[in-house]
């Protein structure tokens, strides 16, 4: 691997650029290759304008980080990096050596506040030159992915386990945690026996976005029976209206020719008004037939007295 120590400085001289920010490098995995791989990664980053920090993580944290990758637990690794890292960005490379001198690089780009990005490259029958090329490919892929503007969407639903479609493509089931490009997205959440929910969400680069969706149960179609009562009430109102008109029309006028006369005009007016009120109530019930009773109908009361009637419509303001 002596060629590696020669090629890394050459990369720095040939590709030097403007500074982009502090970045740390941590290498885990095969102990015998860690110094060489770290030199390669640091040389690549320096050549692309990044300022390197000398100690990205404390020694004990580096050991714990290796344990996280053995368990393939990126959330464990992310928490450790965000809590202990000396810079906002860290590149972690795990080196695994297989049979026949095959070397596999698994690289992670950790940037505080965002989900880690991972890339993998394998160097088969790895020579010094091939190792440098594999490291260059890995870092080019990591840096290219890191430059994409992404944010994080955390999606939950009630009930859970609903299917999610993002911008027309299936994305999995809730609860869902997914990285999305910055900008507007259309989210469709669906579950058996529920009404599909469609939401628009705007993702901001580097920031988490939480969305909670409650899926409604579809309203049942109106039952034919649900309209019988409203029609009966409308019919009763019509009958009262006709009765009121008849009473008013047949009322007798005091002409002095008879000792008594039948004056039903006031009663007829009251009954007719009551008929209109009852008919209005029936119409209200008919319009609400099949809808959830989230509010009671306005209570109506009517009473008859000698020579007239009273109608009361109670409501609150």
Image (cartoon, rainbow, N blue to C red):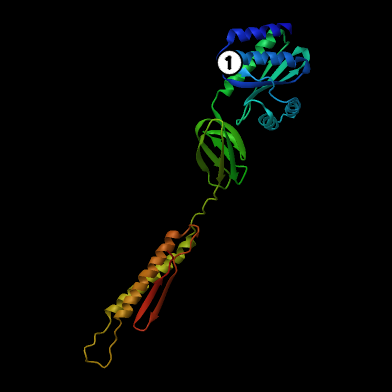
- Residue 222 image offset from top left, x and y in percent: 48, 57
The answer to whether residue 45 is above or below residue 67 is above
Question: Which residue is painted at 61% across and 7% down in the image?
Answer: 13
Q: Is residue 243 visible?
A: no
Q: Is residue 41 above or below residue 270?
A: above
Q: Specify the quadrant that holds the C terminus.
A: bottom left
Which of these two is toward me, 197 or 147? 147
Which image quadrant for residue 305? Answer: bottom left
Pointer 1 local density, CA inside 10 Å: few below 14, some 14–19, many at least 20: some
Q: In the picture, residue 32 is in which quadrant?
A: top right
Q: Is residue 290 left or right of residue 20?
A: left
Is residue 277 shown above or below 216? below
Q: Is residue 289 visible?
A: yes
Left or right: 303 as drawn, with respect to 116: left
Residue 11 is situated, as x and y percent measured from the top left of the image, at 62, 9
Mark count: 1
> Quick one: quadrant of the N terminus?
top right
Instruction: Decide which of 51, 181 is in the foreground and name it.
Output: 51
Provide the residue designation for mark 1: 49
Q: Nearer the viewer, residue 60 or 312?
A: 60
In percent of width and height, residue 144 lies at 57, 20
> Seen in the image, is 288 located left or right of residue 216?
left
- The residue that appears at 27% across and 78% down in the rendered structure is 249
Outermost residue, bottom side: 259
Q: Is residue 90 above or below residue 204?
A: above
Write the residue at 73% across / 15% down: 35
Q: Secondary structure at mark 1?
A: loop
């Amino acid at each position: 691997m002596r060629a590696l120590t020669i090629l890394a400085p050459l990369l720095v001289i040939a590709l030097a650029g403007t500074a982009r920010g502090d970045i740390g490098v941590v290498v885990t995995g095969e102990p015998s290759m860690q110094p060489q791989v770290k030199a390669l990664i640091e040389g690549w980053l320096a050549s692309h304008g990044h300022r390197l920090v000398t100690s990205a993580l404390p020694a004990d944290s580096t050991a714990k980080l290796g344990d996280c990758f053995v368990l393939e637990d990126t959330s464990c690794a992310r928490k450790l990096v965000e809590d202990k890292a000396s810079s906002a960005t860290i590149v972690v490379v795990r080196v695994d050596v297989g049979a026949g001198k095959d070397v596999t690089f698994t690289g992670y780009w950790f940037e505080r506040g965002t989900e880690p990005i991972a890339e993998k490259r394998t160097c088969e029958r790895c020579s010094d030159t091939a190792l440098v090329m594999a490291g260059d490919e890995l870092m080019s892929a990591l840096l290219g992915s890191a430059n994409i503007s992404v944010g994080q969407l955390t999606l939950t639903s009630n009930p859970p386990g609903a299917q999610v479609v993002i911008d027309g493509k299936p994305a999995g089931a809730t609860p869902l945690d997914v990285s999305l490009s910055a900008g507007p997205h259309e989210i469709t959440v669906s579950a058996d026996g529920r009404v599909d929910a469609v939401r628009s969400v705007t993702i901001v680069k580097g920031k988490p976005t939480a969305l909670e969706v409650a899926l409604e149960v579809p309203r049942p179609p109106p039952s034919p029976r649900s309209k019988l009562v409203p029609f009966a009430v409308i019919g009763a109102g019509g009958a009262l209206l006709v009765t009121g008109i008849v009473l008013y029309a047949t009322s007798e006028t005091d002409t002095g020719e008879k000792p008594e006369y039948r004056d039903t005009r006031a009663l007829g007016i009251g009954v007719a008004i009551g008929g209109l009120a009852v008919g209005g109530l029936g119409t209200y019930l008919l319009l609400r037939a099949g809808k959830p009773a989230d509010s009671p109908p306005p209570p109506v009361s009517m009473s008859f007295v000698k020579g007239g009637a009273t109608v009361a419509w109670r409501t609150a303001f």
